[in-house]
Image (cartoon, rainbow, N blue to C red):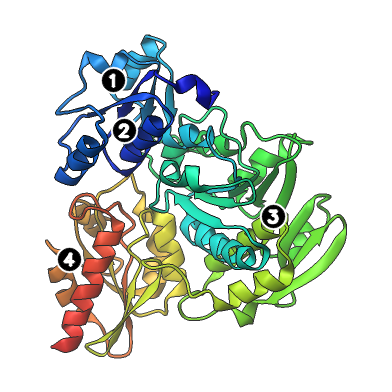
Amino acid sequence: MNPEALYGKPVSVLGAGKSGLAAAELLLKAGARPFVSEFGAIGVDAKEFLLALGIPFEEGGHSHRVHEAEFCVVSPGIPQTAPVLHDMDAGYLPVFSEIELASWFCRARIIGITGTDGKTTTATLIHRICEADGKRCGYRAFSVGNIGVPFSSKVFEMGPQDIAVLELSSYQLERCYSFRPDIAVLTNITPDHMDRYGGDINAYAEAKFRIHATQGEDDTLIYNHDDPLLRAHFDRQEPWPFKVVRFGLNAGDLDGVREDFVSVANGEIITRTAGVQDGVVRVDSFMKPSFRGDHNLYNALAAVAASRSAGIPSEGIARSLVQFNGVEHRQEYAGAACGLEWINDSKATNVNALRQALQATPAGMVLIAGGRDKGNDYSALADLVREKVACIIAIGESRQKIVDAFRGIVSVQPATTLREAVSLAARAGEPGSCVLFSPACSSFDMFSNFEDRGMQFKQLVREQASC
């Protein structure tokens, strides 16, 4: 859509969270007349924000006024099955995501990252690489999207020379139609959010694939060649209208691939571009306790592929990789207490993220898991849990499901609060072993978000250490 066509037009915004408020402010700056509608209650700070800007709003339900608009911008937390969206679709009122809206105004180059796991770490790493290169070359790198800063809140600050590193969830991609990243990255696709997608992984994958739906010959798509679902999707059509770069752990598996790739050979990340192979960085130079495991090696490969596609030289990429220490709440060392090491993996909100954490943590651990279940199948972890875990402390709404899944495999104890879980773990752990907090569930049953959950866990660990 032409942004100039918005002037004076009424636009509805569904949801008064961070992305909804940012979208409303962007629309106001563009000369539109936004109206914010929240099904639940609007927080005090959000109300003050809207009142200060003179943006009208409603709460406690969606009135007919939301339909009296040129189009609607929907917040990602609102499911596609919501009655208000059904009515809008039936009435042919266009509905767009906040990402779609912001993209209409974006002058910067866009690197978009999506996938089930690794997208935050990959996006953070790409941003650090671009930020360091930008200081040398005179451009700015912005970290926006699902990482916590709405795209709409920063888009007017971006110039043509800048780079927007945009983490994207499937929810944010669902109502994107013209959004077109210059570089798109797909980390992997495994079952997640099955409650939202009716248990259909193909429906979930289709939302992710919207990241490349409008890419053309000047754009680049980067994907994990080791992921079976991604490999099947991208191998079924050749050539694609965009440039394809594959990444994977074994360079030998990619030798027969015609397109460019990034991989590992003889302990070194290598790239092949236009038939020319280049060594980038030794793996052992950047792997460390705070950034370890094959899953993080995949994240590094994806970041190298995206950074090279953006024109950043290998030397700068290597420096940033060596300096990188991981992401908060993702297998983060939370300290030592009661003779145990404590690992905060609060960002693990699905079974595959828990699998990665189990694989990267020494055997004999105490595992704290649970929260709001998203249609998880815990049975897929039975063998790994038997191998690596001495005891499970189950919390949250899913605690009984976790108890039932692992009863007879390891000792499982339910806990009603995170404080109780930490106390039980401190008593259950063998001296010198680890306590891994990797919930495999969303946080919304007990916490405001995974960051809140992780911060509370770290505080409880500090309290244990001071006892």
Tag 2: amino acid: Ile
Q: CA distance from mark 1 to mark 3?
A: 40 Å
Give the side of residue 399 with respect to residue 389, left or right: left
* Location of the N terminus (image quadrant): top right
4 or 3: tag closer to the N-terminus:
3
Instruction: Give residue 66's quadrant in the image.
Output: top left
Q: CA distance from mark 4 to mark 3?
A: 43 Å
Residue 310, disc: 3
SS state under label 1: helix
Q: Residues within 10 Å of mark 1 (few under 14, many from 20)?
A: some
1 or 3: tag closer to the N-terminus:
1
| Residue 134 in view in this figure | yes
- Residue appearing at x 84%, y 65% in the figure: 277
Tag 4: amino acid: Leu
* Location of the C terminus (image quadrant): bottom left
2 or 1: tag closer to the N-terminus:
2
Q: CA distance from mark 2 to mark 1?
A: 10 Å
2 or 4: tag closer to the N-terminus:
2
Residue 84, disc: 1
SS state under label 2: loop
Q: Residues within 10 Å of mark 4 (few under 14, many from 20)?
A: many
Q: Which residue has dot 4 on it?
A: 418
1 or 4: tag closer to the N-terminus:
1
Tag 3: amino acid: Ala
SS state under label 4: helix
Front residue of 347 and 414: 347
- Residue appearing at x 57%, y 57% in the figure: 140
Image vertical order of residue 437 relative to residue 397, above or below: below
Is there a contact, CB below 8 Å, between mark 1 and mark 4?
no
Q: Which residue has dot 2 on it?
A: 78
Across and down, in percent, residue 238 comes to 78, 36
